[in-house]
Image: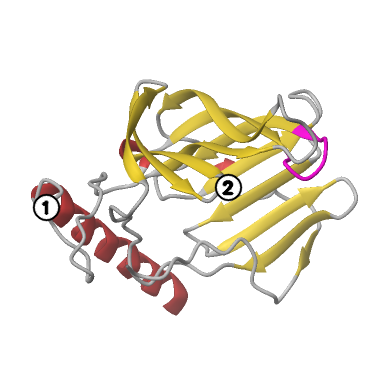
Amino acid sequence: MLKLTRFLALISSAALIAAAVLAAGGGLASATGQPLVPQPSEWVAFTADYAHVNAAYQDSRVGRFYRGDDGSTRSESGPSKSEVTAIMIKNFYLAKFYRWTPQTGWTEQPMDVPQTPWQAKFTVGMTKGDPIEGFDIIRQVSGNRTIHRAPDLNLFVLINQEPCQWSRTVQCGSRYTNIKLGSQPQSLFSPPAGVPIEMQTKPGGIVYKPPV
């Protein structure tokens, strides 16, 4: 009960601070004096198709991504949409990280949650990019990697591009497409009822980000 009470308090605090950012029209500054990127005051629920090409070796995966109203996420991936070989769930409400593969079955780990809301600030290399999937984009270059974030999706990374080490013509990284807004069934963010689950004590699925 104490953990649940703490988590609900954190979510309430996050909503209040994010609302202040919106009310300021993006003028609210971080501790370093740099302007923060405006974003919704609450989690935006959506689904999306997912594709990833590994930069280190020739491997690609596709799948589906889900985000719930409380920020919980679920990703399903495999060599094809009809063959799921990995499921990862970050359940914000329970502060649990669940993972499934055919080899390990379901595992459960404690998950760190933010003590303060994460708010990206404008930094060197962060500019406004062309819209993607109908969403405004903040484009950020970090070394040889280019990241495209959607502020209206709580700064979710829609495209993460990086050079392939094994090809000069193929673009590696991840991309989310076919985005549809809307609430998701809560059952998506827990393992199926009655399945065996291996409990692990080491934290997993870390979502904590240090304050800016």
| Precedes in sequence: disc 1 or disc 2 | 1
Callout 1: SS: loop
Label at residue 99: none
| Tag 1 and tag 2, C-beta contact below 8 Å | no
Amino acid type of disc 1? Gly
Colouring: secondary structure
Residue that protrudes farthest toward the left in the picture: 24
99 w.r.t. 168: above or below: below
- Residue 121 image point, x, y percent: 29, 56
- Of residue 146 and residue 121, the one placed in the foreground of this image is 146
5 w.r.t. 42: above or below: below
Q: Is residue 48 left or right of residue 12?
A: right
Residue tagged 1: 27
Q: Quadrant of the N terminus?
A: bottom left
Q: Is residue 56 magenta?
A: yes
Q: Is residue 165 left or right of residue 152?
A: right
Callout 2: SS: helix
Residue tagged 2: 189
Q: Is residue 30 left or right of residue 119?
A: left
What's the residue at 44%, 24% (across, down)?
Answer: 180
Q: CA distance from mark 1 to mark 2?
A: 35 Å
Residue 88 visible in the current orientation = yes
Amino acid type of disc 2? Phe
Q: Residues within 10 Å of mark 2 (few under 14, many from 20)?
A: many
**Residue 110, picture quadrant:** bottom right
Instruction: Point out the stretch of residues depicted in magenta.
Output: 54-60
- Of residue 156 and residue 88, the one placed in the foreground of this image is 156
Residue 192 visible in the current orientation = no
Q: Is residue 165 magenta?
A: no
**Residue 166, picture quadrant:** top right
- Of residue 26 and residue 94, the one placed in the foreground of this image is 26
